[in-house]
Image (cartoon, grey):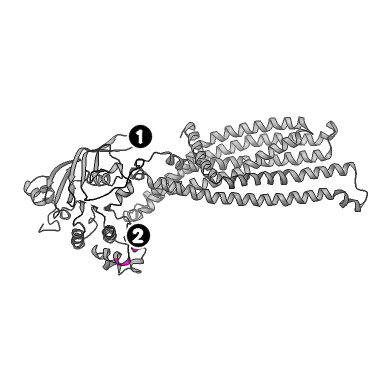
Amino acid sequence: MSKAKTASVTRCTLRYYWAVTRRHGGYFALAVISTLGFVGLLTFGNPYVVGLIVDKLAATPPAGEADVLQAYAPYILGLVLINVVGQASSKLQDYSVWKLEILASYDLATSTFDTLSNQSMTFHAARFGGSLVSQTQKFISAYTLLLENLIYAVMPIGLTAVFTLAILALPVPFYVAVLTVLLVVYTVVAWLLFRQILPLNAATARAQNALSGELSDSITNILAVKTYGREAYERQLFNEANHDVLTADSRRMRSSTFRGAVTSFIIVCIMTCMVIFITGGSVWFGISAGTLVMAFTYTNALCMQFNRLNITFAQINRGFGDAAAMTSILEEPTLVSDVEGAPKLAVRAGTIDFEDVGFAYVEGEGEPSTRVFSDLSLHIPAGQRVGLVGRSGSGKTTLTTLLLRLSNLQEGRILIDGQDIADVTQVSLRQQIAYVPQEPLLFHRTVRENIAYGSPEATDEQILEAAAKANALEFIETLPQGFDTITGERGVKLSGGQRQRIAIARAILANDPLLVLDEATSALDSESEKLIQDAMATLMQNRTSIVVAHRLSTVASLDRIIVLNEGRIVEDGTHTELIEAGGEYARLWSRQSGAFLGDS
């Protein structure tokens, strides 16, 4: 990432963080005020009073022990008051920062989740889920890191510099002039080096995200890794990604070390000026001992604060680097979005029309697109059961994803009961379509929750009935906790056929007017497939249904079969009509001898 692009992303990150901070501005203001009180009182109030005591001691030493408390009582009381208020300010600072972090993290997590969940399937298909999780966590934790460095480091450093120069300006103006020059040099150099390291931090964060993605990909597919004996290969891929992190971290470390050496040299110059001033200030300029004590204490505190600035800048750099990936995602336009004021879809009969549909997958910026459909038109009357068949890559699944509006059309339109799906809300569209994909989509939740996912208000009796219709009840009752059994991540505790039957039960329970089955029986054995087909036959009655299948037995008994080839409709008719025609469908059927439904 170039320096200009890194700077642009950094500005965007600041915009997001400032927006959420301003939303809880009361706590931020409290944090600033308490920091001002804490630094002003404890860092400068104590040395100031001590300096006054030293001057009083030097001018009029107490005559006896009894005079000490009487003479210095106001100073002692002042010190006590300063420390009480200063400590209270410190605790108020901690409370306000903590509260702000909690509220801001909640808001950032919510907005990030909303952005990711509203993005299209094209967006998600191009990214590792593990990387998105990692980037989300880093984006939220980076806010905490930057806020704490601002309140606990940057502000105290700035306040220390301002208070030091302001308090010492009147008694020792020449010393303040030299100190100001050195501080300006320090700030300019530190800022220039800070800007140079920002791209290095962004590169480190990208390498770490890639490492997280590689780890997630390997662990998610651990069964394939083990069954093919590819542990060594996956270890090699992981080590390559891990080495990229090592290289990026090393570059960042070298740059940070150089910055630390340069800024430390300036600190040494400041300390040298202070030692010279303290040593000769009284003799050369007649400065009082109390003033010298204050100058030493303030300058030493200033140097200690600026000495921490190198670590502070390193953490700030890391925070912006960690946030960069998610900031870029938040800045991406949503590929599929509702038009303003879009109404809900109202399904009355369930007629579906594809009119002059054109669609191509865009691989990426500068990459050629893959054309799927050109001028495709298809009318599906209400209640008709339609099968989509064809060779792999012919566009069967793509047609269903376009109907679900998981991607936007580039040409033409899709109508449901005369309503353009691009003009209605996505939620209302998908809530009218029961969808069962080829790969069952199960959550790491109970069987009951997975079946009722599309119908959360369903009763236990309705859930049980749906499971029975999907031929799932028998195996569910044998599970350790029955319907309360946790299915595991992506349903890993269940077999492929069991997962598919859970997904079919979910669709049955949803009872939507439109039905899309994308290879819904592909994971079932012959006996289970016949039972599921019986259940689906009942499910599809009086319901517009689209069934995508490689197994032609799945669609042989449907009202109509559409044969696709390279994004075009090459045949359209019933099973009997297409067999008699002797075309593409007949050739496909002949290759699937037996086809599980010999009497079809």
Q: Quadrant of the C terminus?
A: bottom left
Q: Does residue 237 appear anywhere in the picture?
A: no
Q: Is residue 96 above or below residue 155?
A: below
Residue 49 on image: x %, y %: 79, 44
Q: Which residue is mark 1?
A: 365
Residue 456, numbered circle:
2
Q: Which residues are magenta?
A: 441-461
Q: Nearer the viewer, residue 561 or 209?
A: 561
Q: Does residue 304 appear anywhere in the picture?
A: yes
Q: Is residue 263 left or right of residue 65?
A: left
Q: Is residue 479 above or below residue 215?
A: below
Which amino acid lies under the numbered mark 2 shown in the image of this protein? Pro
Q: In the displayed orientation, state which residue is furthest to the right.
A: 63
Residue 183 on image: x %, y %: 67, 33
Assign a secondary structure to mark 2.
Answer: loop
Q: Main secondary structure of the magenta part?
A: loop
Residue 111 on image: x %, y %: 45, 46
Q: Residue at x 37, y 41 (%)?
A: 334
